[in-house]
Image (cartoon, rainbow, N blue to C red):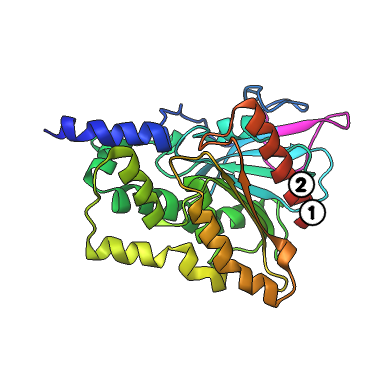
Amino acid sequence: MLHHRLLLPTLFCNLFFGIAHGGGYTASGLMTTAGATASEPLSATHEDSSCAAKGEGANNVMTVRTTLAGVPAILRVPKAIRKPLIVLWHGLGPPAGESELMTALPLDDVPSVKVYLGLPLFGARAPADDAESLARRQAEDYASRIFEPVVVGAAQELPAVLKALRGKKCLGPNEGIGLFGFSAGGTAVLIALAEPEVPVRAAVTVNAPTGLSAAIDAMERATKRQYVWTDSTRQLAQRFDSIRRTTEIASGDPPRALLLFHGADDTIVAPSGAVSLRNALEPFYQRSGNDERLKLVIAPGVSHGWTEPRPLGELRASVADWFNRYL
């Protein structure tokens, strides 16, 4: 019976989250040679995972596989570092891993260290037991078995990741960071923005649900099945609803620079959520005279997946421009 119950959730995972079977990672410290491009494999054996780029030539980039407070990560280090680092989260669908996201979005136009983090339960942390697979977890309960451990979990482990980066001299004691997230990773960004212990200067979300309720709406549309809410999952939705936490998200003087990028043709996560979030945040930015630090882009011709050549070029340019301007 459970096999049949898994069919529709698995279809939803393929459409929205694209649950992938990522390969395992080695111990920390593996990196490519200097000058690697985003598409090159990470296969060299240097064990210095600090944020000091090595090699010759203005275009050299060093990539490092490592773990940060137990979180699998890839560091992309330019030779010249002139801006604070950027932490990036992939989605649950393509790009569905830190290496995939780095290939799609290397951001070499931004002179900062990029830190691509693996989400909980993905890649090296994917469950080995079929009983704990993501499809089975979703069949049991999306809110408590996927959203809470993966999306909320990513945001909650970020402070420890930043502490590890400070230990590697990649981040100053009180230095702010950039944050990027796609889809579920974008929801993790919104959750992290509402937490005071994460010092964020600028952030970008792409096709991100604004919280658990929006993610459930997307799941219901994709599977044609109604989700059964409980008191505990309703409380979870309220706690991590970014529209209810606009005061925290817009905190700071000046407030964090936030770009909400959403595909107009996204049929999985409707752009209306990003519009509602922008509308809820706008008064806070207007009152402080910082309207330009909040931007909504509804991109024509862009669907939930954005790695085709045309949308990819537009997205790369928009994200790089935002971080170059506000980091």
At 81% across and 46% down in the image, what residue appears? 81
* Residue 2 drawn above or below residue 111: above
| Quadrant of the drawing holding the N terminus | top left
Q: For mark 2, give the secondary structure.
A: helix
| Quadrant of the drawing holding the C terminus | bottom right
* Residue 58 drawn above or below residue 180: above
Residue on which disc 1 sits: 325
Closest to the observer: 237 or 207? 207
* Residue 50 drawn above or below residue 195: above
At 49% across and 53% down in the image, what residue appears? 272
* Amino acid type, residue under disc 1 in the picture: Arg
Which image quarter: residue 203?
A: bottom right
**Residue 318: percent from left, percent from top:** 71, 44
Mark 2 in CB contact with mark 1 (< 8 angstroms): yes
Q: For mark 1, give the secondary structure.
A: helix
Q: Is residue 41 left or right of residue 82?
A: left
**Residue 181: percent from left, percent from top:** 56, 47
Mark 1 Cα-neighbour bin, 10 Å: few <14, some 14–19, many ≥20: few
**Residue 186: percent from left, percent from top:** 53, 50
* Amino acid type, residue under disc 2 in the picture: Asp
Mark 2 Cα-neighbour bin, 10 Å: few <14, some 14–19, many ≥20: some
Residue 321 is labelled as 2
The residue stretch that appears in magenta: 46-62
**Magenta stretch encompasses residue 49:** yes
Secondary structure predominantly adopted by residues drawn in magenta: loop
